[in-house]
Amino acid sequence: SQKRPNMDFFINTKNDIHSVHPAEMPTTPIKKIINMFLENGITLDPFLGSGTTMVACKELNMKGIGIELSEEYCKIAVNRLKNTTRSML
């Protein structure tokens, strides 16, 4: 049976930096969830928002697909990804 994420991951997730998206989260809890469920798979985020999940994927050297309706949020996500470096695993 697969491990289920402990919802305590999402307590105190307020970013220390100014967020440009109302629901932006830090990548740490997202990376824990991705590592818990995926092993060299592809992550799908159908509500991309500010791109946190794709940033986590990039930092983990994993593939991801993000879908977002808002062009403004797509630009924010692209900018975050451009400023994210891959992990040196």
Image (cartoon, rainbow, N blue to C red):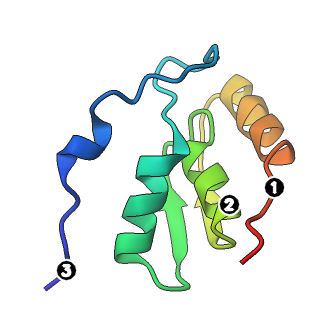
Which amino acid type corresponds to the residue marked 2 in the rendered image? Glu
Which amino acid type corresponds to the residue marked 1 in the rendered image? Thr
Q: Which residue is mark 1?
A: 85
> Could you say where residue 59 lies in the image, as x and y percent from the top left?
68, 60
> Could you say where residue 28 lies in the image, as x and y percent from the top left?
49, 49
Q: Which residue is found at the position 21% from the left and 43% from the top? A: 8
Nearest the eye: 74 or 18: 18
> Could you say where residue 48 lies in the image, as x and y percent from the top left?
56, 43
Q: Which residue is found at the position 51% from the left and 62% from the top? A: 44
Q: Which residue is found at the position 86% from the left and 45% from the top? A: 82
Q: Secondary structure at mark 1?
A: loop
**Are discs 2 and 1 less than 8 Å apart at CB?**
yes
Looking at the rendered image, the quarter that the C terminus falls into is: bottom right
> Could you say where residue 68 lies in the image, as x and y percent from the top left?
60, 40
Q: Earlier in the sequence, mark 2 or mark 1?
A: 2
Q: Look at the picture and state if 35 lies above or below 77.
A: below
Tell me the crowding category of disc 3: few under 14, some 14 to 19, or many 20 or more residues within 10 angstroms, Cα based: few
Q: Nearer the viewer, mark 3 or mark 1?
A: 1
Q: Nearer the viewer, mark 2 or mark 3?
A: 2
In-image side of 12 versus 49 (left or right):
left
Q: Which residue is mark 3?
A: 2
Q: Earlier in the sequence, mark 2 or mark 3?
A: 3
